Every structure is written in C-alpha cells, then in structure tokens.
Image (spheres, rainbow, N blue to C red):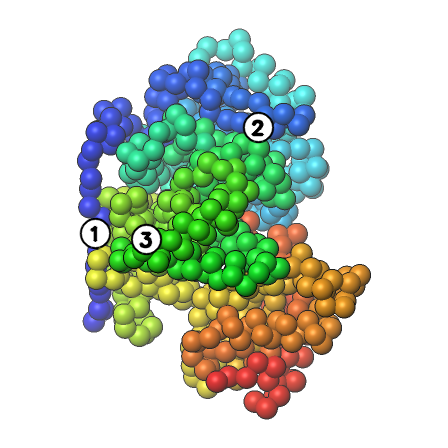
Amino acid sequence: MQEFAICTGVQQMDDAVAALGRLQAQSLFDLFEASTARFPHRRLFLTKVNQRWQEVSYGALGARVERLRRSLSGLGVETGDRIGIIADNCVEWAVIAYAAYGLGAAVVPMYTRQLARDWEHIIVDSGLVVLFVANESIRAQLGPLLSARRALRQIVVIQSPGYEEFLRCGDALAAVLRPPSAEQTAAIMYTSGTTGQPKGVVLTHGNLLSNVLPLTSMILENYQPEQHLSLSFLPWAHAFGQTVELHIAIAAGSSIAIAESLDKIADNLREVRPTALVAVPRVFTAIYAGVRRTLQGKPRWIRGLFRAGVASAGRRARGAHVGFTDRLALALADRLIFSRVRAQLGGRLVFAVSGAAALPSEVAEFISALGIDLCEGYGLTEASPIVTANMPGQNKLGTVGRPLAGVRVEIDRSVGLGSPSGEIVVHGPNVMRGYHGPNHPEGIFTKQGGLRTGDAGYLDDDGFLVLTGRIKERYKLSNGKYVVPGPLESALKLSPFVSDAMVYGDGRPHNVALLVPERAALLDWARNNGLAGLPVEQLCGEPSVIELLRGEIERALVGTRGYERIADFWLLGEDFSQENDTLTPSLKLKRHRIVARYQAEIEAMYERTATPEAWSCRAE
C-alpha cells in the first residue's frame, strides 16, 4: 500500500483574478490580445541595438504579430500545425509564438546551443511545417539534415532579408484569426535530455493558463505592473523562462528587457535597472559567492557584519523575534554592504523568482537581507512548469512554497526514501497532456492520474514543500548507503573558490568530486600567495591550491553524514558548459556526459584513495 501525505492549493479570488477572469481567457492568445488592446502605448520590450536600448510597445508588437499571422496563413498553416523556433530570446521570438497561437498552431521551441542531432530529432518527431531560425549559421547546419523532410514547408531566417520578404507575402492577404481553445496544444516543449533523446512534453493553453493566471494575480496584488521591469536571460525555449517571464509579463502589462548575452548580465543589470529578476539557483548562488569573494580582502569586522546581517535577515524572514542587536546589525550591514550589492544589481530590484532546483538556505537569506522579496518555487516542464510557489505574505525560507490554486501535491513514501521524504506526485490542471509520439516512458502517471516527478521532498506542518533531491540522481555506494549529490554540490558551490561541482560515487566505496574553480577568486588568491602570473590550468595542480580547496570542502560539508563526505577531488581547468555538452540549456549537469568526459580523472581519484588513510578529505 502506498503511503501519502497530501497538500492542496487554496484558490484566492481577489479583484485582480476577477479582472483576469472577466476576460474569459481560453488561451495565451486571449491574454495577449487583451493586453495589446489595453496598453497599446505602454512599453513591452527593451532591446539593445547599436549600443542603445530601444523600446517596443504593446501596440507595435500586436501589429507585428498580425502581420506574421497573415504570412503564416498564406503559407497554409492550419489549426493543429506546429511551428518551430531555434533562436535566443528576442522580440521576434514572441512575435512568432503569438502569431502561431492566433492560428491555433502549436509552438515547438529549441535552443541555439542544442546539438544538431537533437534539432533533427525534434523537427522530425514533432512534424514541423515551418521553422524559424536565428541566423544563417543555424540554417547551414540544418541543410544536410532536412533535405528529405517533406513535412517542413519552409525555413525562415530571422536575421536576414528573407524574413522581411516572408512578412511582405502576407501584406496583401485578408486578416485571419483562429483563436485556440483551452484544450488545444499551445506548445510541445522537448526536455533538455540529460539522458537519452529529448521527449516532447505536450502542454495545452489550459495547462499554461493554470500557471499564468494565479501568478499574474500575485503581481497585480503586490506590485505596480506598469513599473514592473524584468531582465530576461533564461531561455524562453524552456518552460520556466517562457511561462514565468514572457507570458506572465504580457498578461500583467509589464515590461521585459532582453539581456544581450549571459556574459553581459552584470552590465545589463546596471543599465536597465530592473525591478524583478527571474533566475535559477545557480545565478543567485553566483551572486552570493561573488560578494563573499569580494569580502575576502576586507577587515574581519566587515566579514562578521555581513554574516550577522544575513543571519538577522533570515530570522526576520522566518518570523522569529528580531531584537535590537539584530536590527542594528542588519541596518549597519545594509548601509555598508547590502546597499552596494543592490547598486550592482541596478538598485531597483524588489522581487526575485528562483526555480528549477532548491536554493541553498544561506543564499535565500542573503537575497532577503538585500531587501528583495524572494519567491522560490518548484516545478518541471511536465507541470507547465510551476507546482508550488512562495508568495509575498506567504513565504517560508527553506521551502519552495505551497501548491498553486487547483494543484494537489502528494508525497509517495512507498519509494523507500525514508520518512518524511518521498516522491513528489502532482495532480491538477497544470499537468501535461502527455508526451508526444508513441514512445512514452512507463510509470510517469499513477493509477489515479498523478504525475510522478522523480523529485524527492516532503510537506512541512504548514503545507509548504521542502525539496530533498532528485531521485534519479540518487546512487548507492558499495557499502549500501544512498547518496543524493545535489545538496552536497549546492553546499560546495557556496565557496567563493568553487564555480561548479559534481559529486560522484555510484557503486564506489566513497564519494569524489570534480570541481570547477572560480577563476577570478583563484587568480586573486594566487597574486597574494606567491603564485602571481600562473594560469588557472597550472594553478589547479599547485599543492597550496589543493590545500586551499581541501579546506573549503571540509568547511562546506560540516554537518553532513560521514558516508557523504568527499574522499578526494579534482580541479578542472575548464568550465562545465553547453559548448562541451556537460550542461543542459537550463544549466543542469549532464552527469553521464561529465562522467564519460572525465573518466580518467575519476579513476585516478579512486586509485589514490584505495584506503581511507589516503583520502584527501577524510570522513569524520
């Protein structure tokens, strides 16, 4: 018999939700039409062109969507057809998506950094009829793959004269509008494929609206949407970035500044001064580690003030008593440290959303100490993607919130994780229709129709969900002990000297770790410790650097179980990245790829830790 703990989201119908409900929205396109009609002159997008930020209004975007919709209709696009996009976030990405919705067609987004073999699989599996690509380089890569694909009628290159020619084809045609129903497919989103081929997640307009409406209501209740500006860098090809950023911003009448690139985020934050930031834990952890790295060279009392301020903010956020000493520490830390961090983030941030994985509690407390409302949530593509979310006024640090309205979460403890944890099972209008095509994974749904997430967690006494790891990432050591590597990796990345980490030990006697050093911090340390001028790749082999990182690991993993400790580690001279196929587009580790790439280093670590006495980091 299965043992379940259950929590259900509570519907909160307020004026904002009622206003959205009066629109009788059945689809994302309905919300788009309503916003373009209500806010024709309001800024929607900011994009940087020739070193200057330029605005695109709601009305201007609506006109561009209608123009493209005519061209697609002239090409014969019908209800139920699929339109593909291979492009980074840009204004035309949104134009293509909403033009497709207006014809009842579904959008199939892909990543520009995806492997060509994944593009081929998705194009064939989804049956695209039209494909939009960012540039000629992508078009050239697709040429050999698509010569025999008869379903694909046309490939349109966005950054080319051909795009304008394609638009002109529809200028003389009559307007065509076929708004979709809630039951129609809005998107087929292919999972990033940490193992095997990507699977197409079929999401209806109703699925996505079940996320968009309550979260839009939250923005309308707590913020001024006309002043709400986010900086977009999470890919809209991923469900998290697309739903939480693009669709919700448009439904709320807010604005989006599109970042130039990942390496320009810091500059763009200072330039556009956003009020909101939607990101994954890796981004917030990097900000936290960067601040700690800066503080390394500061007096001890400054470092102590930082720690005291963060701790005080954490107690305040948890509703604990905050006495005079706490308030004083937080006020001083804010004046001397936190205000400067906010300035580096643009100076106007009031709201941040973190999703895709659990955020370390130290990082959550740090964001709270900055005076920013942090709403951490949980979800997966198969759930449109949000399942639970912390909301202003209902925010509990260390959790990923309560279920959204209409969503029910069960904890299946029969999977053998040990109480109180179990597998998170989701019921609700956000759950996907299924996977596209005939080859569906077995056991993804329970007999009652619940979505098995593959994630582990538990519900606390107040109904907030706490994540404890990814079940599929769990492995067993040769001594029979199970290890969930995610929380260990998160702890390691809190070090200012660690940019990335992967813990490994499947079937082995103990854990080892592959560490990517934080280059700037390591070079600064080297300059102050007699190693100036050495490149990072050479520093990774220096005995004093090994000792430095050994100490960082031991500090990071204080309090962990003995069998979870790291016996040895290897410093890598290259980053985990999408380019070397070790990260997914949503910045998750491709563990099997990493193990294959660094098999020699892993075996070398196990050879030199064959006995406990030889461990670089001994277990307590």
- What is the distance, in whole Å, between disc 3 and disc 1 at their CAs? 24 Å
Instruction: Identify whether 199 is placed above or below 52.
Output: below
Q: Quadrant of residue 30?
A: top left
Q: Amino acid at mark 1?
A: Thr
Q: Amino acid at mark 2?
A: Thr
| Residue under the point 24% across and 44% down | 405
The residue furthest right is 533
Instruction: Identify whether 326 is placed above or below 50.
Output: below
Q: Quadrant of residue 202?
A: top left
Q: Which mark, residue 8?
A: 1
| Quadrant where the N terminus is found in the figure | bottom left
465, 199: nearer the viewer: 465
182, 80: nearer the viewer: 182
Residue behind mark 2: 47
Mark 1 lies on a secondary structure that is: strand
Q: Quadrant of residue 353?
A: top left
Instruction: Identify whether 219 is placed above or below 589.
Output: above
Residue 532 position, x and y percent, is 78, 63
Mark 3 lies on a secondary structure that is: helix
Q: Residues within 10 Å of mark 1 (few under 14, many from 20)?
A: some
Residue behind mark 3: 317
Q: Is tag 3's residue or tag 1's residue first in the polypeptide sequence? A: 1
Q: Tell us which disc is closer to us: 1 or 2.
A: 2
Res. 82 in view: no
Q: Amino acid at mark 3?
A: Ala
The residue furthest top is 172
